[in-house]
Amino acid sequence: MNSRKISTIDILPVLKYGNPLLRQKVKDVTNFFELDHFIQQMFLTMYNEGGIGLAANQVGRCINLLVIDNRNIDEDNGKTYVFINSKVIKCKGSVSMEEGCLSIPDIRAEIERPEVITLQFQDLDQNIHQKSFSGMTSRIIQHELDHLEGKLFVDYLSSSKRMLIHKRLLEITKNGKPSSEIIL
């Protein structure tokens, strides 16, 4: 990231629940040459929204690209990441944690996910990497990868919990946010 002044032009609108692009499966990146500026915009948008991860389709581009910044969560090992054409190749364990989402504001819920993942991904130079992640970094990556598959964290909820938030999801679809916050 360069340290230029943030411009509102660089802040992208985050798509909210109900937008059909959030339910589309993305395509792999084939043209890496114009990604640098878009990645900068994604980080700026994520920071502006107070997020820790953002998938490209949340800002209207249906490509296999996600960014995360876990420095506020993991001060010892925290850093920023850019993952292109990512896929999980191995999972281990299971852990439940509370999740929220920039595309589904003011709704949070306990979600069970694998504890450790091994991820294959590319960087901006098209190099292929394989790395294992655990803890909060693993959770953030899995949440954003779900976006790239057209899946949202509320899809993991039981039908009774989905009924509890149904009205708020309709409000997000219509107004961009619910009338009140809810934690399940």
Image (cartoon, rainbow, N blue to C red):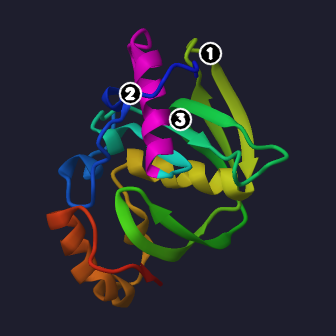
Camera-side residue of 9 and 67: 9
Q: The disc labelled 1 sits on which kind of residue?
A: Asn
Task: Classify residue 89 by image quadrant.
Answer: top right
Which mark is on residue 7?
A: 2
Q: Earlier in the sequence, mark 1 or mark 3?
A: 3
Q: Which mark is residue 127?
A: 1
Query: Pointer 2: residues within 10 angstroms few (<14), some, or many (20+)?
Result: few
Left or right: residue 73 versus residue 159 is: right
Residue marked by disc 3: 86
Residue 91 appears anywhere in the view: no
| Residue 47 drawn above or below residue 3 | below
What's drawn in magenta, residue-wise? 29-49
Query: Is residue 42 part of the magenta span, yes or no?
Result: yes
User: Which residue shows up at 38% across the image and 86% down it?
Assistant: 161
Q: Mark yes or no: residue 44 visible.
A: yes
Q: Secondary structure at mark 2?
A: loop
